[in-house]
Image (tube, helix red, strand yellow):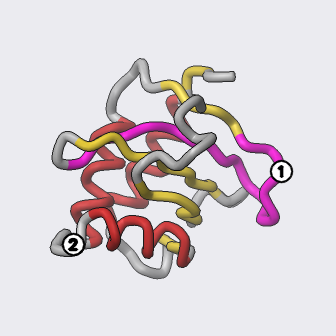
Amino acid sequence: MDVLIPDQWKKDVANILHSADATRIIMRESARLGWQAAFPSAWTHDLYDAIEGALSDKSIKGRQIVDMAEAGETYAFWFQYESRKLYGKICLTPARDIIIMYSAHPPRKGEEKL
């Protein structure tokens, strides 16, 4: 079920992405490979900028994911890059200083409906 993503979560995640600090952004292989396959000539900072832009939308909705292995607050949501719809899934750790990026790719079967 889609819900408005909390403002504080969006702000914290966007600030970490904006920092582009590799010690604060853990990108799982699934996110890295999905992004690279979809946009082989794009840079990682392009991904960060696209997600940060999406999170600046006050009305962005997503689905809270509660069954991830790592502790934290995780949301799945849609964002765009080069006019393509992409599926993102990010965990903000309990200390709110590190994110874990699980997904950053075009929709796969079953993800069309968040």
Observer-nearest of 86 and 12 = 86
Tag shown at residue 43: 2
In the picture, which quadrant includes the C terminus?
Answer: top right
Observer-nearest of 27 and 14: 27
Identify the amino acid type marked 2: Trp
**Left or right for 94, reference 12:** right
Magenta stretch encompasses residue 37: no
Q: Disc 1 residue type?
A: Asp
Vertical relation: 114 (above or below) 16:
above
Residue 35 falls in image quadrant: bottom left
> Vertically, is 94 above or below 74?
below
**Rendering quarter of residue 113:** top right
Residue 99 visible in this rendered orientation of the protein: no
Q: Quadrant of residue 59?
A: top left
User: Are the residues flagged by discs 2 and 1 in contact, CB closer than 8 Å?
Assistant: no
Please determine whether, in this image, residue 19 is positioned above or below residue 79: below
Count of number-bearing discs: 2
Quadrant location of the N terminus in the rendered image: top right
Tell me where residue 77 appears, x and y as whole percent.
51, 38
Neighbour tally class for label 2: few under 14, some 14-19, many 20 plus, Cα within 10 Å: few
The residue lying at 80 percent from left, 44 percent from top is 66
Q: Which residues are magenta?
A: 65-81
According to the image, label 1 marks what residue? 67
